[in-house]
């Protein structure tokens, strides 16, 4: 009796909820994190983070393909932006719907492998991966690929591990959409094919006619993009590094792998704290059970926890790419489940209060980092927070100024790419023209820009507002206007944001 009393004292409400209502726990934590990353940008970001403004500028054109890759993420971003009345809220909401769909798909996969109770632990661990916090706000191909990859893994397991032939149709749709989302899709699909061919169950799954029908669905979905790729002559192998470069590339690979490990630091810390090293003597830790995991399921989880991370970082290191191919979100999506599978059939949850605190901190620290960067960085003089630029006032000012001067709505904007992409978010949605690299914006040429007219913008260092030499060279005869000053969200010790500008008047028909 004394023993059971002591046991009850250490069993918290959270543990009981995980045992009795695992799905409820998953929904609560996933929706709470999504709400955090929906509200925080709306409160603190005055301009879209990262390349999101460029994503919207490209999406507005509905190109079948661009130098930024397959088109699906760009189209969906534009649809979400328009659906929200040309407000960035629509795109932030879309990004968080992707996060919710990713975690729910991963939970369904984890439940099929380790049962509902331990699947909750897998999701709680995965949520601490840094890639799923603030970078998840920046909707684009990397964010859209995550739920598609999670769904693809779920249906791959249903096909290979559970022999469910009815999963082929969903699998083929997800594979096609993934190919329309990220250039890394071919490599990811090759990993799935490699696992299927390496296992007896996988080979048996591939022997039916179903894969041929799936291939047909994928080809139909991706045909317009494939035609664009062939016509654009972009199907070529990247340049292999010279032997003298291999040492530097190997170091780069090491840095990328190190970055992935750093992004997993929350998982590592939680696992270390839950080991017996820190447990009090005689503590009765509650236990989360699971049915035994079959060998093929174990291999599936380990393969897709290690394969995308290893292959993605290796390719990125070899060809000197900025980030892991496919993104950290895809590379680390199975990390939490892999740790749970490795932990065994019985997982003791020791030092629950400490674990809860550390988990909450791992979720909250990226949000605090955004808060500190936005509010305190401007006071250090260490540069501006990119999200503090007042996108709406900037876009409205240049849109209205052009309309007042020419009696026509603003149709195009050129000059400084960052400022120009913000102006392209105006209600009239002017075209973005990258004048220094016009091949990247094929919907406009210099001749067409000069004919339809537009605004050219640049950062002005003084009240004189003379355009930089490269802009003068591209737009000879440009007459600069008086620079316009804007307040950032927090100016701090920074000078006012001054934007130099000039109007290229539309030519008559």
Image: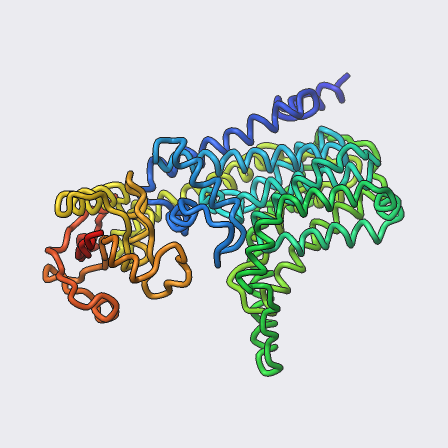
- Percent position of residue 327, x then y: 56, 53
Q: How is the image coloured?
A: rainbow
Locate residue 230: give its quadrant. Answer: bottom right
Looking at the image, the residue that sits furthest to the bottom is 244
Q: As rendered, which of 334 and 79 lies closer to the eye? A: 79
Q: Is residue 351 above or below residue 492?
A: above
- Percent position of residue 72, x then y: 53, 45
Looking at the image, the residue that sits furthest to the front is 509
Left or right side of 478 for 125:
right
Number of numbered labels in the structure image:
0
Q: As rendered, which of 312 and 412 lies closer to the eye? A: 412
Q: Is residue 320 above or below residue 125?
A: below
- Percent position of residue 300, x then y: 77, 46
Q: Is residue 170 above or below residue 483?
A: above
- Determine if residue 315 is in view: yes
**Residue located at (71% from left, 23% from top):** 7
**Residue located at (22% from left, 44% from top):** 399
Left or right side of 14 for 490:
left
Left or right side of 341 for 368:
left
- Determine if residue 10 is in view: no
- Percent position of residue 284, x then y: 72, 30
Locate residue 8: give its quadrant. Answer: top right
**Residue located at (27% from left, 55% from top):** 380
Locate the N terminus and report the quarter of the image it occupies: top right
Q: As rendered, which of 354 and 34 lies closer to the eye? A: 34
């Amino acid at each position: 009796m004394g023993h059971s009393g002591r046991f009850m004292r250490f069993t918290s409400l959270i543990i009981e909820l995980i045992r009795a209502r695992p799905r409820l726990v998953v929904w609560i934590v996933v929706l709470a994190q999504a709400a955090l990353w929906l509200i925080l940008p709306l409160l603190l970001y005055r301009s879209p983070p990262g390349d999101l403004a460029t994503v919207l500028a490209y999406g507005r054109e509905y190109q079948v393909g661009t130098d930024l890759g397959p088109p699906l993420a760009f189209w969906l971003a534009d649809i979400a932006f328009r659906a929200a009345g040309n407000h960035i809220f629509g795109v932030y909401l879309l990004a968080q719907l992707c996060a919710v769909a990713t975690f729910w798909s991963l939970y369904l996969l984890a439940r099929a492998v380790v049962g509902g109770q331990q699947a909750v632990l897998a999701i709680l661990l995965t949520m601490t991966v840094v890639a799923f916090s603030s970078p998840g706000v920046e909707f684009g191909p990397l964010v859209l690929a995550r739920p598609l990859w999670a769904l693809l893994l779920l249906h791959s397991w249903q096909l290979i591990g559970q022999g469910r032939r009815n999963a082929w149709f969903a699998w083929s749709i997800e594979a096609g959409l993934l190919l329309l989302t990220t250039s890394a899709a071919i490599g990811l699909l090759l990993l799935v094919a490699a696992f299927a061919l390496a296992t007896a169950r996988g080979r048996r799954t591939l022997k039916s006619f179903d894969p041929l029908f799936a291939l047909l669905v994928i080809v139909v979905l991706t045909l317009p993009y494939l035609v664009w790729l062939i016509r654009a002559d972009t199907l070529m192998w990247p340049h292999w590094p010279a032997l003298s470069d291999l040492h530097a590339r190997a170091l780069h690979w090491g840095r990328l792998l190190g970055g992935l490990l750093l992004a997993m630091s929350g998982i590592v810390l939680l696992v270390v704290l839950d080991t017996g090293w820190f447990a009090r003597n005689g503590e009765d830790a509650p236990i989360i059970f699971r049915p035994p995991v079959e060998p093929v399921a174990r291999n599936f989880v380990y393969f897709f926890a290690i394969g995308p991370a290893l292959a993605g970082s290796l390719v990125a290191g070899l060809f000197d790419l900025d980030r892991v191919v496919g993104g950290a979100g895809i590379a680390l999506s199975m990390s939490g489940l892999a740790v749970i599978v490795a932990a065994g059939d019985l997982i003791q949850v020791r030092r629950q209060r400490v674990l809860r605190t550390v988990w909450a901190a791992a979720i909250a620290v990226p949000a605090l980092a955004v808060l500190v960067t936005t509010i305190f960085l401007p006071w250090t003089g260490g540069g501006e927070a990119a999200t503090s630029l007042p996108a709406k006032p900037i876009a409205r000012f240049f849109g209205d100024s052009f309309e007042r001067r020419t009696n026509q709505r603003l149709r195009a904007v050129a000059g400084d790419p960052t400022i120009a992409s913000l102006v392209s978010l105006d209600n009239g949605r002017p075209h973005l023209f990258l004048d220094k690299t016009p091949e990247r914006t094929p919907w406009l040429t210099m001749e067409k820009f000069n004919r339809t007219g537009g605004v050219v913008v640049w950062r002005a260092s003084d009240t004189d507002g003379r355009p930089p030499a490269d802009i003068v060279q591209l737009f000879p005869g440009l007459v600069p206007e008086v620079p316009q000053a804007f307040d950032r969200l927090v100016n701090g010790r920074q000078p006012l944001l001054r934007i130099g500008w000039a109007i290229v008047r539309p030519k008559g028909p």
